[in-house]
Image: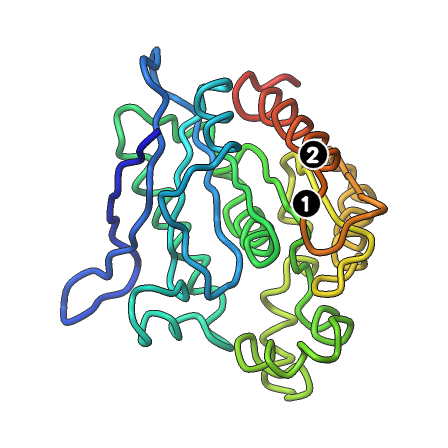
Amino acid sequence: MEPELIQYPTFDEVNGKPRMIPAFVYRPRNANGKTPVLLSIHGGPEGQSLPNFSPLINLLVNELGVAVVVPNVRGSSGYGKTYLKLDNGPKREESVRDIGALLDWIAKQPDLDATRVGVYGGSYGGYMSLATMTNYNARMRCGVDLFGISNFTTFLKNTSSYRADLRRVEYGDERDPAMQAVFEQISPINKIKNITKPMLVYQGKNDPRVPLTESEQMVDGLKKQGNKVWYIMAQDEGHSLAKKANRDYTYGAMMLFLRDNLVNLVK
């Protein structure tokens, strides 16, 4: 299945014109009416989504009838050094605002249902999923977070020591009081009350990059406030869904979760 490459305007400007954000759009064939939408946000954050074959996207589009939109928000690689650094440090949530602009674009598309939008991502994409839910909860139906960062302070303190300094260059240093204040403001765990929609969270128990505690504190907080939350914790995984049995189980659960909370809206 080949996607359509689109560009949509975001909140800021370049040389007096709106900055354009690239995204790939996978649409179901022969859709009957407006289709629900799943945003799929890459990790990294200095990653880049490409129109490569994805079994998961094909499953979502062909079996669930969901349109999948895959943006390369600011901070993605492949678009030059300036674009790559636009989300560094205290600018972190400017990449989240790019998702808000994408929701605006979806609302203008005659074939997409802006009342049925979900978000999915893993690792940094998991943070983006959580951040989308905390910032745009009213415009979302559900979210899927795979081993995402829920609190930048605890993440930087608990990630493997060999990675901490490298990550501080990207995210900012939690030991700096000014940056710590930013982390307090933007970390999804500190805005968890904004989430009222269903969530699915997956985590590998042995993850050395985004530790188990990042997902468990999010799940615990969601449960305490009465949210509908599905939690999958793989005992034999690290920072991935590397094993086929775990991948099949998790993707199967995702299909059921999205069927009920995005496509059919079962209460």
Q: Residues within 10 Å of mark 1 (few under 14, many from 20)?
A: many
Amino acid, disc 1: Leu
Where does residue 22 sit, x and y in percent of width and height? Answer: 29, 52
Compared with 58, 209 (above or below) is below
Q: Residues within 10 Å of mark 2 (few under 14, many from 20)?
A: many
Identify residue for label 1: 241
Using residue 216 as the reference point, say whether residue 192 is left or right of it: left
Pointers 2 and 1 in contact (CB under 8 A)?
yes
Q: Earlier in the sequence, mark 2 or mark 1?
A: 1
The disc placed on residue 250 is: 2
Q: Foreground: 16 or 212?
A: 212
Secondary structure at numbered mark 1: loop
Where does residue 104 sit, x and y in percent of width and height? Answer: 33, 43
Amino acid, disc 2: Thr
Using residue 173 as the reference point, say whether residue 63 is left or right of it: left
Q: Give the residue at x 77% y 62%.
A: 211
Q: Give the residue at x 43% y 31%.
A: 37
Where does residue 147 sit, x and y in percent of width and height? Answer: 68, 52
Q: State which quarter of the image contains the C terminus.
A: top right
Q: Give the residue at x 62% y 48%.
A: 194
Q: State which quarter of the image contains the N terminus.
A: top left
Compared with 212, 157 (above or below) is below
Secondary structure at numbered mark 2: helix
Task: Give the quarter of the image for residue 155.
Answer: bottom right
